[in-house]
Amino acid sequence: MSATKDITRRRVIKSGAVAAAAAGATPYFFTRAFAEGGYTNAPKGDSVTFGFNVPQTGAYADEGADELRAYELAVEHINAGGGGMMDTFSSKELKGGINGKKVKYVTGDTQTKSDAARASAKRMIENDGAIMITGGSSSGVAIAVQGLCQEAGVIFMSGLTHSNDTTGKDKRANGFRHFFNTEMTGAALGPVLKNNYGTDRKVYHLTADYTWGYSQEGSMIKYTKDYNWETVAAVKTPVGAGDFSQFITPILSSGADTLVLNHYGKDMVNSLTQAVQFGLAGKQVNGKDFTIVVPLYSRLMAQGAGENVKGIFGSTNWHWSLQDDASKAFVKAFGEKYGFPPSQAAHTTYCQAILYADACQRAGTFKPSEVGKALEDFEFDGLGNGKVLYRGEDHQCFKDVLVVKGKENPTNKFDVLEVVEVTPREQVQYEASLLGGELGPYNNG
Amino acid sequence: MDAIFLQFLNGLDKGGAYALIALGLTLVFGTLGVVNFAHGALFMLGAFCAVMLRKIFNISYERVSETEVDFLGKPLKEQIPYLKGIFGEDLGGFMLDYSVPLSIFLAVIVMGIVGFIMERGLIRHFYKRPHADQILVTFGLAIVVGELIRHYFGANPIPQAAPKAVSGSANIGYLVGLGPNVIYPWWRLVYFAFSVSIIFGVFAFLKFTTFGMVVRAGMQDRETVGLLGINIEQKFTIVFALAAIVAGVAGAMYTPILPPDYNMGMDFLVLSFVVVVVGGMGSLEGAVLAGFLLGILQSFASMQAVQNLLPGISQIIVYLVAVVVLLTLPRGLLGRKGVMED
């Protein structure tokens, strides 16, 4: 009774005003606490902390585990000043540690969910003092974490993210991507598909219902329409649907002679397996052999789909069977440590860690704006993709793209893909304005 | 017409899996009064019996190849299965090829033991506890089982091939007087036939055996059955083990359709509960009817024409039907009076 009596209009208004003032001031205290030393989490002792934010549970956990292995290897090599692709990397600035500090790391689990990924990145920045966040295996996650890192004032070196949006309409100054994107996949894969399957085809798209799926579908349509590949239907499928048979049966009577599976990970393993079970691979339609295309491949996925990948075209950022010195050095270092070859996810994350470390060393600081400038328009070689440009306009790497095909006669269980064409960088590079978006200014915290 | 027939077939095999899982769920609920959220995990464990059997069959000894090299350029260590050495190339090869159907035997044994231990060790202590407690403990158990499987088998799906004789597609269009576009995978037809046989088997067991009679009586009035001097506790253990076996063999045979991973039980669990609720809590016939009905509806809702008319309907159709059924028939399609009404 007395409690009720105590609540007066004046008291409510006063309490509300205090709460509003506290809420308004929170970001100020938050950022000031961060920015001691001139930028967020400026390292004070003899070490600097990286935050590896990878899927440790969920559908991409195996790719996340491979990313983590690669990061551990990269940290070893950075601290030792050599080993693996550090020995072949064109920049020779790193001599052991970065700016006189040893690298330590903390890890987080993205669970391939945007909210969980943001929460773990935030924890690593606020509690563990991470100077840089890197990793991930989904474009939805990458875009979400990139936004968080921009707000917090740390650099984000994305892991496996293939949607155009990451360095397109959702790009941020603090975010950098080494992995390729759907625009490049389309530009590389289109001509190869035309050369192998000809013109005038009727195409059925099954597309994962999120940012990457739309991006991939759009790029495939864009780069095949000149060859008169007509879209019969583009059906969105829920991520993690498991059984895709109800989406596959309509294809049989659709008149389509080509199926493009804009799926990745577990979805791709399931949808491809089921498409083959329904006899699509051996079918004749419109007087042509029915064709299946998987625009984005990974070796881990191809292993999962088993024999069903044989003869099916796709693209990949890197493959362990490449015979350049850098790739061989990486496969040797990784293979000797873990007993199997690295995946493309491992490769891109290893590269991102090395590239960040090198940029800090060249900049002589860990300040995001200075490190970012060191990465912008940086041209390098010796990391397994030939000559690469980290374009300043959109923070996207441009390099040769590999067109691969499921291998007909594998010699071992890792030998599931063969490289059929290395599409030169000039053919896949585009104007930065094409994908829209604004980098905005760097945020140092 | 071709497309409609194919979607119908597709709904039948999907419905077969739903019906088998829901059958075990409702059997446990009807007799034991336990809401078992770990039932999906039992389906997944059954699937991993198929994975395990193939792994056992593939236990190999190493032979260093004189000609081939591994990914690091070192001499390749070839894996030669002991199975072929023990049973010969033909029989060993046959066993490897038929490992999925053979895994039914392993699933029956493993799932029987798992069901027995689960009921005696855990479920029994929750008979008289509120349904919320049962849901919490069984859901927790499902997470633990899933994570254990992930730890030992990894997170990626592990494809299992159907036997070569039934791995292709049947051109059933000619058989039913439709065009050449009506192609359907043999294994899915096998699975449909298998699920129908199991369903009939379970019904026959409950209908024509004394044990089945006691169980049915227990589903009607547990207290009176106990008063007649029948050891109902012992019967409950067997019923739980039977439900686990049904879920397990359903999972093992499903592996060539959907490569199993640690999460597949969760994917089926929610749908199966909707199936049980739509069919009517505690009604075996209702579970089977609703399983097939929802499988078929889900399949039709995925057709392009339906999607164009009602975008996204394929993802909500099951829940929409559940809402409509529960509004018009609160006990479900064939629900019994008095179940979950106290």
Image: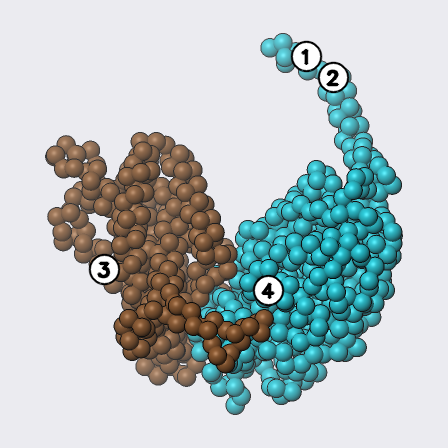
Callouts 4 and 2 close, C-beta under 8 Å: no
Q: Work out whether residue A302 or residue B61 is closer to the camera in this orientation and state it.
A: B61
Real-space CA distance between mark 3 and mark 2, rounded to the nearest whole angstrom: 71 Å
* Label 2 residue SS: helix
Which numbered dot is residue B106?
none
Chain letter corresponding to the colour cyan: A
Which residue type carries mark 1?
A: Asp
Reply above or below: A75 against A414: above
The residue that disc 4 covers is A335
Chain letter for mark 2: A
The tint of chain B in the picture is brown
Q: Earlier in the sequence, mark 1 or mark 2?
A: 1
Expressed as whole percent of the image width and height from the top left, the position of residue A165 reads 73, 61
* Label 3 residue SS: helix
Callouts 3 and 2 close, C-beta under 8 Å: no
Which residue type carries mark 4?
A: Gly
Q: Earlier in the sequence, mark 4 or mark 2?
A: 2
Callouts 3 and 4 close, C-beta under 8 Å: no
Which residue type carries mark 2?
A: Arg
Q: Quadrant of the C terminus of chain B?
A: top left
Residue sitting at x 50%, y 60%: B156
Q: Work out whether residue B78 or residue A376 is closer to the camera in this orientation and state it.
A: B78
Q: Earlier in the sequence, mark 4 or mark 1?
A: 1
Reply above or below: B203 against B102: above
Which numbered dot is residue A11?
2
Residues flagged by tags 4 and 2 on a common chain: yes
Real-space CA distance between mark 4 and mark 1, rounded to the nearest whole angstrom: 71 Å
Callouts 4 and 1 close, C-beta under 8 Å: no
The residue that disc 3 covers is B200
Q: Nearer the viewer's eye, disc 4 or disc 2? A: 4
